[in-house]
Image (cartoon, rainbow, N blue to C red):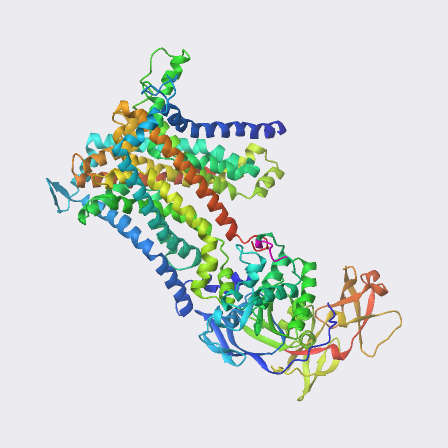
Amino acid sequence: MTVAAEGSPPLRVAGARRSPLLQSEAVQGFALISPTFLYALILLVLPILVVIAHSFWTQDYLTIDHTFTLENYRIALTEPIYRDLLWRSLYISLTVSALTVILAYPIAYFISFHGGRHKSLWLFLITIPFWTSYLLRVMSWKVILGYNGVLNSGLIGLGIIHEPSTALLYNSSAVIITLTHAWATFAILPIFVSLEKVDRTLVEAATDLGDGPLRSFLRVTLPLSAPGVISAALIVMIPTVGDYVTPKLVGGKDGVMIANAIQAQFGKASNWPLGAALSVTTMVIVSLMAGATVLVIRAIQRLAR
Amino acid sequence: MTAMRRFLPSWLTSYAILYVAFLYLPVIFLPIFSINTAATPKFPLSGVTLHWYEDLPRTPALIDATWNSLLVGVSASILSTVLGILAARSITRYRYPGRRTINGLIMAPLVLPEVIVAISMLLVMLQLGLSLSLFTVVLGHVLVCIPYSMTVLTSGFEGFDRSLEEASADLGESAFGTFRRVTLPMVAPAIISSLLVCFTISLDEFIIAFFLTGTEATLPIYIWGQLRFAAKLPGVLALGTLLLVASFVLMTVAEILRRRAARRTQNEGGLYA
Amino acid sequence: MLERVQPERTQSDRVMIEIRDVTRSYGAFKALDDASLNIREGEFFSLLGPSGCGKTTLLRMIAGFDTPTSGSIAVDGQPMDGIPANRRPTNMVFQSYAIFPHLNVEQNVAYGLKRLKLQGGEEKRRVEEALAQVSLTGLGKRRATELSGGQRQRVALARALVMRPKVLLLDEPLSALDKKLREQMQVELRRLQQAVGITFVLVTHDQYEALAMSDRIAVMFGGRIAQVASPKEIYQRPVNRQVADFLGGMNFVKAQIVAENGASLVVDTLGFGRVKTDKPKAFVRNGGAATLGIRPERLRVLWDNASAKFEVAGKVVERHYFGEITHLIVEIPGLEKPLSVTETNDFGADDIPVGAPIRLAYDPEALVAMAD
C-alpha cells in the first residue's frame, strides 16, 4: 500500500513536466501503445475521415467529383426511400435495445444477487452462444421462422394452425426477434458488472430503514445500476442500427434496413458519396438517439428517489 | 413479505433457465437439421443421416474456403494479439496523458456498426490502390479483434503486482531475463487465450470479410453464397454445426486459460491480494 | 515492549550506506528533501514515519528502483549512480512480498542464484540453508499460492538472504500480518539480523516496531529527516513535538527560557515551576519560549501520604481503563491543558474516583525541552 502511496507518485502528479523519470514513464507507455494506436488511426480514424470527405463529393460515373456539395445529404434526408429506411432502422434499433435491456436485466440481477457459487458458470453459459458465428445464428432464425420452418411445422403439428403462416418471416418483427437474440449477451454483461458494484449493505440499509424488497430494489439497486443499463442500451443500439446480415436474411422486403442501402451504394449502384452520406447520417442520428436515451434513463433514475 | 422474498428467487431462477433456453434454442436447430435426410428443415425429421457431413470434404470450394479461413484466422489472431499485448501492457502498466482516449479509440470497433467500419476501410484501401485479397481481410479482422484481445489480456495483466518484476531485478535478473522468467510465464495463459478468442472471431466474422475480400472466400462467405440455394441448406447446416463446435471448444479453452491467468496474477494469499 | 535478550552485537563504525544531500522531486512535490544519513555496517536501521514521509522513496532509491533528483547514494563505499537494481549489492523484502506465484518455494528462493550458475550442489545447499534460517525447512516444494501470510514473508526473507547481500532492505515487511504474528516476527527478524550480521534497513510506520527492533532509527516527516538516534534517545529525547507525538503520547507544557548554556537549559513553567534540563543537541532557540514534554508513564500517582521531591497536584477529570493500565486525565491549576497520566493497575489506579484530588511525582530527568 505504501508502495502505491509513495513509490509511484506519478499517479498523483501526472501533469508535472520537469521530472525525467516521469517523462520516461509517459514516453515508455506511449511508445508501447503506439503501434496499436497507429493501427487504429490508419484503419479506423483515417477511413472514417475519408468517408466523411466522400459524403461531400459527387459520383461522376467512374470518377469522383471533388467539389463540395450537400446534395448527398439532401438525398439521404429527403428521398422517401432513404428516409423510410433510416426511420425503420432507428425504430428497429431502439426497439431491440429496449427489449434486450428489459429481458437482460432480470438475468443479470439473478446472476449477480442469486448466482452464488455458480456465478461464473452462469456467465460462461450466457457468453458462449455469443461467440458462435453471428451469420449462423441469424441462419438458425431463418430455419425457425421460415415458411417450412420449425415454428410453422411445429404449430401445424400441434394443430394450432392449418397452413404455414407467412407472418413470421420476412418482416421487421423477424428482424427484431433475431437481433434481440443476437445481442442478448452484450446487454447482460454491462448490467451485471454494474450490479456487482452495488454495495450489498446499501440494500440492507434500505431494508433496515423500512423498505420492502421491491421498494429497496426500485430506490437503491435499480438507480445504482443505471450506468450499466445505459451502456447496455448504447452497446446494442449503435451497432444494430447498421446491421446488414439480419435484414438481408430474415427481413425480406419489409425489413430492409439502412445498411442494405449503404451496401448497395458501394456495390451495384456504385455511388460511393451517397453511400458515405448515408453512413454519416446514420451515425449522427443514432448518436443523437443514444444521447437522448442516456438523458431519458438519467431522468428516470432521478425520479426513482 | 417473506413469501415474496422466497417467491422472487424461484421466479427469477425459472426466468434465468428460460432465458438460457432462448439463447441456445435457435443454435440447437443447426445440428438437428444437419442430420435430417430431407433438404427442408422441418419437423418431424424424415430420417437421420450423416450424408451431408460426408459430402463436405468432397466440395473443392469448401476446402479452399477452409484454408483461406485458417490462413486469415491464424494471421489475424497473431497480429491482433501482438498489438493487443503492447496496448494492454501499456494501459495496465503506465500512466500518461491521453491514455483513456487512446484506449477508447482502440476499443471503438466494438461498438461501431460493422458495415460502416467495413465500408470505411474499403474506401481507404481502394484509394490506396490496395487490391482486395485475403490480406485486406486480415487487416480488417485485426482491427475488430484488437478490442477483444485487449479485454482478455488486460484481465490477465491487471493486478500483475509490479513488485514481482522489481523483485526479479532486485535478485540480479536483467530486464530481458525478468521478462522471460517472470512476466512471460505469468501472462502466457492470457496470451494463448487471446490467440484463441481472436482466431474464433476471425473464423466466424462475415461482414468485414464480405466487403474486403477479393475473389477468395472465407468460410462464412462460402456459407453466405450457399444460402441462395435451398437445396444446399443441409450441407450449410452441417458445415455450420462444425463451425459451432469449433467455436465452442476454442472459447471454452480460452476461458479456462483466461481464468487461470487472472488467478495467477492476483498474487493471492496476502492481505494485499 | 519486547525486551532484547541477546547481547548487543558489537558493531563496527564502518559506514555501509552513505546518503548525501539526496532530494527526490516529482515536479514541484519533493518526496525527499535534502536527506543525509550514514548507516553503519551490521546495523539494524529503521526509517520511521507516517505514510508520505519519503521513507519508502529513500528505500527504493537505495535498492535502485528510483533515482535521486540530486545527491548521491553509496553502498559499501561504492557510488550507486547509474547502477541498476539488478547489479546492486542490496536485496529487498517487498511489502507485498512479491512471491512469484508460478514458482514453488524452492524455485522462488533459488531465483536469483540461477544466474550465478553455482557449481555442484552449491545452489541446493544455499537454498536449504536459507530455508533453515527462516524455519521453512521441508516446505521447499510447497506452491507459492498455498502459503500463509507469515510463510510468504519468510520465503521473501529467504529469497533475499540467499543472495548474501551487503544490505537487506525491508519495506514494511510486517504490515500485512496480524498483531500476534507481527510481534513474533519482530523478535525473529531481530534475531535473524544478529545471526547473519547483515545491515538491515527497515521501513515502517509503526513506532513500536521500530523501537523494538532497531539499533538506530531515523524519524522522517514530509520528506525530511527529523532525528536520527537510538530507540531510547528517540523516545526519551525527541527533538521536536512532531517526533515526540509520533513516538507515543506526550504532555506538552509551555515554558519560558530563563537561562541557556552549552549543555543545559533553565526554564520557568506554570505547573512544574522552574526546571533545569539537558539542552537537546538540535535545540535552536526561537525567542524566549520553549516547550517541555513529559511522557504520561513518567508521571506517577502519589498514594496517601507518600511524598516526592518533585510533585504536582491537581484533580482527576477523566479515567479510562485499559486492562493492565489506567489512563487518567488530570487538571493541574495553572496548566492550560490537563495532563495525561498512565499508571499500572497494581495499586488500584483503576479505582481512583473522577473528581478526586491527586498528586503526581515526576523526575526532572524525564522532562525534555523542545524548541517551539
Q: Is residue C140 magenta?
A: yes
Q: Is the magenta stretch mostly helix, strand or loop?
A: loop
State which region is magenta.
C139-144
Q: Quadrant location of the N terminus of chain C? A: bottom right
Q: Quadrant of residue C325?
A: bottom right
Of B261 and C140, nearer the camera is C140
In the image, what residue occupies the spot 33% across and 15% down?
A164
Q: Nearer the viewer, residue A224 or A34?
A: A34
Residue at image coords 39%, 37%: B247
Name the residue nearer the viewer: C347 or C58. C58
Q: Is residue B116 visible?
A: yes
Q: C192 or A59: nearer the eye?
A: C192
Instruction: Say whether residue C96 is left or right of residue C233.
Output: left
| Number of numbered callouts drawn | 0
Figure check: B135 above or below B64:
below
- The reply to whether the magenta stretch includes residue C98 is no
Seen at 32% across and 56% down, the residue is: A35
Question: Can residue C332 be seen here?
Answer: no
Write the residue at 76% across / 67% down. Answer: C341
Relative to A161, does residue C80 appear above or below in the rendering? below
Left or right, C192 with reference to A257: right
Horizontal side of A69 relative to C278 (left or right) equals: left
Q: For this view, does C243 lie left or right of residue A302?
A: right
Q: Position of residue C81 (x, y in %)?
A: 46, 76
Q: Quadrant of the C terminus of chain C?
A: bottom right
Q: Position of residue A5 (x, y in %)?
A: 52, 62
